Image (cartoon, rainbow, N blue to C red):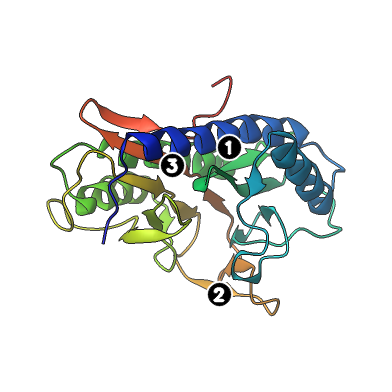
């Protein structure tokens, strides 16, 4: 069942989203050549705690970290380690926080140092645009299939591939709530969007084919063809006035 938040619950989910919005800006500022993904996780976790919030990921499903870090061909769920970032890499950082029992969830993919490959720059631009195309569909009376269709249409028109094995989701008192929100689909299908529903919109897009596999650590998802991948995500509330981005990045 898709939950519909009341006014008190909306205040709480907005508070969680605000912390994540600050966290997005902070994590982006940390991405420089030479920093390790483990250092990023430690700094992100401290930031969340300093905000009076709870890291949403750590311990959930056995997750050992607060910031999931996926580099280059890693799609999602990358575990922080001693790997140091190099100029020309890209890194996806997936992060979340709990405030007053409610979750905020977001992700960005950031270039490290100087990235000049046009294909990689196109990947980053189109994936972020696709997320916003999906968000635009969060209108009262539209359906979940409209979101996925908008994302898929833009991505495939630009010669990129949608990862189909992982999808967006409802969000609220749980990180993952119904419904699933695929990044592909048929317009005017699926559940109807109503005021007070909240969704995490999170396209994962590959330069190469859409196939992915999970590494031996049982967490890190990579592309099968080793092509690079990007991931953007926002938590969004449906309102009578249109989509309200709960996790809007501070300063953007």
* N-terminal-most mark, 2 or 3: 2
Quadrant including the N terminus: bottom left
In the depicted structure, whether residue 44 falls above or below residue 73: above
Question: Is the Cβ of the residue at disc 1 closer than 8 Å to that at disc 3?
Answer: yes
Relative placement, left or right, of 128 versus 113 is left
Question: At numbered mark 3, what does the secondary structure look like: helix, strand or loop?
Answer: strand
Q: Residue at x 30, y 39 (%)?
A: 6
Within 10 Å of disc 1 (Cα), the crowding (few <14, some 14-19, many 20+) is: many
Q: Which residue is mark 2?
A: 213
Q: CA distance from mark 2 to mark 3?
A: 26 Å
**Going by the picture, which residue comes out furthest to the top?**
251
Q: Pick whichever, 138 or 175, lies toward us.
A: 175
Q: Residue at x 74, y 46 (%)?
A: 45
Question: At numbered mark 2, what does the secondary structure look like: helix, strand or loop?
Answer: strand
Circle nearer the viewer, 2 or 1? 1
Q: Which residue is mark 1?
A: 20
Relative placement, left or right, of 235 versus 79 is left
Q: Which residue is mark 3?
A: 235
Within 10 Å of disc 3 (Cα), the crowding (few <14, some 14-19, many 20+) is: many
Q: Pick whichever, 94 or 206, lies toward us.
A: 94
In the depicted structure, whether residue 85 falls above or below residue 185: above
Tell me if residue 67 can be seen. Answer: yes
Relative placement, left or right, of 236 versus 139 is right
Task: Provide residue 95's location: percent of width, then percent of height.
Answer: 61, 47
Q: Residue at x 34, y 51 (%)?
A: 156
Task: Provide residue 43's location: percent of width, then percent of height.
Answer: 80, 42
Question: At numbered mark 1, what does the secondary structure look like: helix, strand or loop?
Answer: helix
């Amino acid at each position: 069942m898709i939950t519909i938040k009341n006014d008190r619950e909306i205040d709480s989910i907005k508070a969680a989203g605000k912390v994540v919005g600050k966290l997005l800006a902070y994590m982006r500022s940390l991405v420089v050549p030479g920093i390790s993904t483990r250092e990023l996780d430690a700094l992100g976790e401290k930031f969340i705690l300093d905000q009076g919030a709870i890291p949403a990921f750590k311990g959930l499903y056995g997750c050992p970290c607060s910031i999931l870090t996926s580099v280059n061909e890693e799609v999602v769920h990358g575990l922080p380690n001693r790997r140091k970032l190099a100029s020309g890499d890209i890194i996806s950082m997936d992060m979340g926080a709990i405030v007053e029992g409610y979750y905020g969830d977001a992700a960005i993919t950031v270039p490290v140092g100087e990235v000049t490959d046009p294909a990689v720059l196109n990947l980053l631009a189109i994936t972020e645009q696709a997320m916003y195309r999906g968000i635009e569909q969060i209108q009262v009376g539209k359906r979940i299939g409209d979101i996925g269709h908008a994302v898929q249409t833009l991505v495939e028109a630009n010669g990129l591939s949608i990862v189909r094995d992982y999808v967006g989701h409802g969000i609220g008192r749980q990180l993952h709530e119904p419904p699933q929100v695929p990044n592909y689909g048929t317009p005017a299908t699926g559940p109807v969007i109503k005021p007070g529903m909240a969704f995490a919109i999170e396209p994962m897009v590959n330069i190469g084919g859409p196939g992915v596999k999970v590494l031996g650590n049982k967490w890190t998802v990579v592309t099968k063809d080793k092509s690079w991948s990007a991931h953007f995500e926002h938590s969004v509330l449906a309102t009578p006035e249109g989509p309200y981005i709960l996790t809007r990045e501070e300063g953007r």
